Amino acid sequence: MTARIIDGKALSKQLREGFKTRVATLVAQGVTPGLAVILVGDNPASRVYVGNKVKACEECGVRSFHIALLGDTVESEVLTTIARLNADPAVHGILIQLPLPPHIDGRKVLEAISVHKDVDGFHLYNVGGLVVGNTIFPPCTPYGVQLLLDTTGTDVAGKNVVVVGASNIVGKPMALMLLQREATVTICHAKTRDLAQHTILADILIVAAGKPGLIVPQMVKQGAIVIDVGINRLPDGKIVGDVDFEGVKEKASWITPVPGGVGPMTVTMLIENTLRSAERALRMRQTDDYQDWEAPVLKGH
Ligand code: NAP
């Protein structure tokens, strides 16, 4: 069997086309969706990520506010900047590009973002929302994976899902989202003993460890769906995931490539969350008692 490719680039393009109509509807009602991206310091990789986000905003008609702060900016100034953006009605989403310089308390900064503008979904309110099964803004990378899985037509309820990687931004929220969809979820991490004994049981294997070549064909169940979140730059400059794509594609039923799988979806879901935030703000303005805490992706079947 050769796996079918889950094409994140194509799905991203399709979703972004749909965003244009939503932006036009908002603009017609006097709201231009806006995303503020704060970058502290000049980490080259972060600059590339911020550039991609700003470009995606422009492509979809979302106004972007790029706030570049020097690497030695004190924490209080970052917090003041966030407070200003929280109060700015032109800003519907606020994103802090991670990692932050070590003298800044990342948790404190993330908690300073208004929960109504937390389009990255990292505020504790949104994290808690994931735990109890409803949230305003699902974190972008797992949100994108969820939509990629949907394109395979697979009902995840009752499936064995193994998530390799337990970070706060990918592995843990991913596991919670799929648990909400009634999958049986196992989370593995660096201290997991005999990783293969878990992965081999996975109907759906999601890998987000940041270790090239971690998953080889012997670790994959015949016919599994394999989602590779990893992005690793090899010494020769080549970008690869965590999965041995060439080997595993002969065993899997569906697989994401790297690049062109999960990567493009992450930025797309950031725009989705920003549009959703602008739509919520508009409806809240129009209807005093409007309540819509639950993101569509998390609703069960
Ligand atoms: P992270 O914070 O470094 O977390 C990595 C996780 O993988 C940790 O939970 C770690 O376990 C686990 N791990 C490390 N080595 C392992 C091993 N040998 N076996 C099993 N688990 C192992 O990384 P992250 O931010 O979640 O990112 C993970 C990867 O996804 C990276 O390659 C990153 O570049 C990529 N990524 C891609 C996107 C995208 O848009 N495609 C977005 C975000 C991240 P411990 O908890 O025990 O340390």
Image (cartoon, helix red, strand yellow):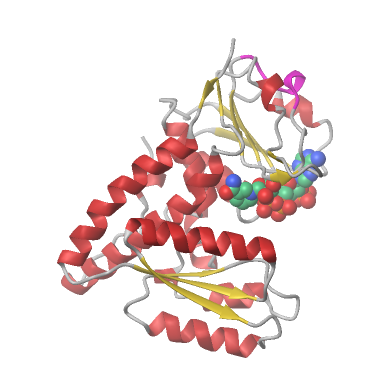
From this viewpoint, is residue 139 visible?
yes
- In magenta, the rendered stretch is 216-222
Q: 174 or 34, which is in the foreground?
A: 34
Identify the image quadrant of residue 26: bottom left
Looking at this view, name the residue that lies furthest to the top: 1
Q: 46 or 178, which is in the foreground?
A: 46
Query: Is residue 217 in the magenta section?
Result: yes
Q: Residue at x 77, y 41 (%)?
A: 211
Q: Residue at x 51, y 50 (%)?
A: 266
Residue 244: x and y in percent read 72, 28
Residue 238 lies left or right of residue 266; in this view the side is right
Residue 81: x and y in percent read 51, 85
Residue 195, compared with residue 286, is above or below; it is: above
Which quadrant does the C terminus fall into?
A: top left
Say how many tags the image has.
0
Residue 296: x and y in percent read 35, 47
Identify the image quadrant of residue 109: bottom right
From this viewpoint, is residue 136 visible?
no
Q: Residue at x 43, y 27 (%)?
A: 155
Residue 260 lies left or right of residue 240; in this view the side is left
Which quadrant does the N terminus fall into?
A: top right
Residue 145, compared with residue 44, is above or below; it is: above
Q: 132 or 126, which is in the foreground?
A: 126
Identify the image quadrant of residue 162: top right
Residue 92, compared with residue 129, is above or below; it is: below
Query: Is residue 44 in the magenta section?
Result: no
Q: Residue at x 48, y 29 (%)?
A: 156
Q: 86 or 245, which is in the foreground?
A: 245
Residue 116: x and y in percent read 39, 70
